[in-house]
Amino acid sequence: MFSKKQEAHSTPQAGANTVSGSTFSVLGADLAVKGNLAATADLHIDGKVEGDIACAALVQGESSTIEGAVVAQSARLAGTVKGSISAASLVILKTAHIEGDVSYDALTIEQGARVEGKLTPHMAELKLAIAGGTEA
């Protein structure tokens, strides 16, 4: 009888630890993914992704390549991105090479980073949308 109670008591704890313990996902340097990625938690990418990415927070390694749109609450980019980026808080490190339009609320770009595209604060997009809506 004690063993049944221990088993029943152990199972919820293991499930709770699994859920609370998985706060980020990692795509290693040897991994190449073709397809869109969506994560409710944080995502660390060191490999290659051909597809759009949507996540809470993105950390990109120096040797990583992303070919697709990126949407995140926060992003710290150090590799190559070929596609649009939308992030509330965006940090572009000196090793990054961005080819695409970037929209942001807060932006930090280290000296040496390459950005080929239009930089637009989210507030400017909102003002344009409001102005466009009143003119119509």
Image (cartoon, grey):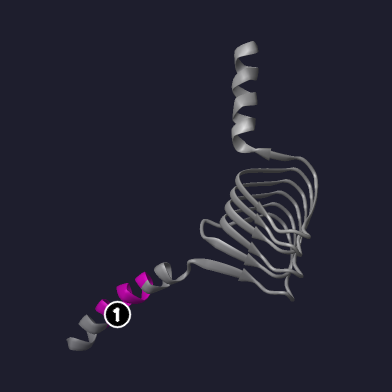
In this rendered view, identify the residue nearer to me: 3 or 82.
82
Judge from the rendering whether residue 122 lies leftward or rightward of residue 11; answer left or right.
right
Q: Position of residue 83 (x, y in %)?
A: 77, 49
Q: Residue at x 64, y 31 (%)?
A: 125
In this rendered view, identify the residue nearer to me: 34 or 58.
58
| Stretch of the chain drawn in magenta | 7-16
Q: Is residue 14 magenta?
A: yes
Q: Is any atom of residue 124 visible in this view?
A: yes
Q: Is residue 4 above or below residue 90?
A: below
Q: Position of residue 18 (x, y in %)?
A: 42, 72
Q: Helix, strand, or loop for circle 1?
A: helix
Judge from the rendering whether residue 66 lies leftward or rightward of residue 59; answer left or right.
right
Extreme residue in the left direction: 1
In this rendered view, identify the residue nearer to me: 125 or 93.
93
Judge from the rendering whether residue 20 lies leftward or rightward of residue 80; answer left or right.
left
- Residue at mark 1: 10
Q: Is residue 101 magenta?
A: no
| Prevailing secondary structure of the magenta residues | helix
Q: Is residue 118 above or below residue 50?
A: above
Q: Residue at x 31, y 72 (%)?
A: 12
Q: Is residue 11 above or below residue 58?
A: below
Q: Is any atom of residue 65 visible in this view?
A: no
Q: Position of residue 123 (x, y in %)?
A: 59, 33
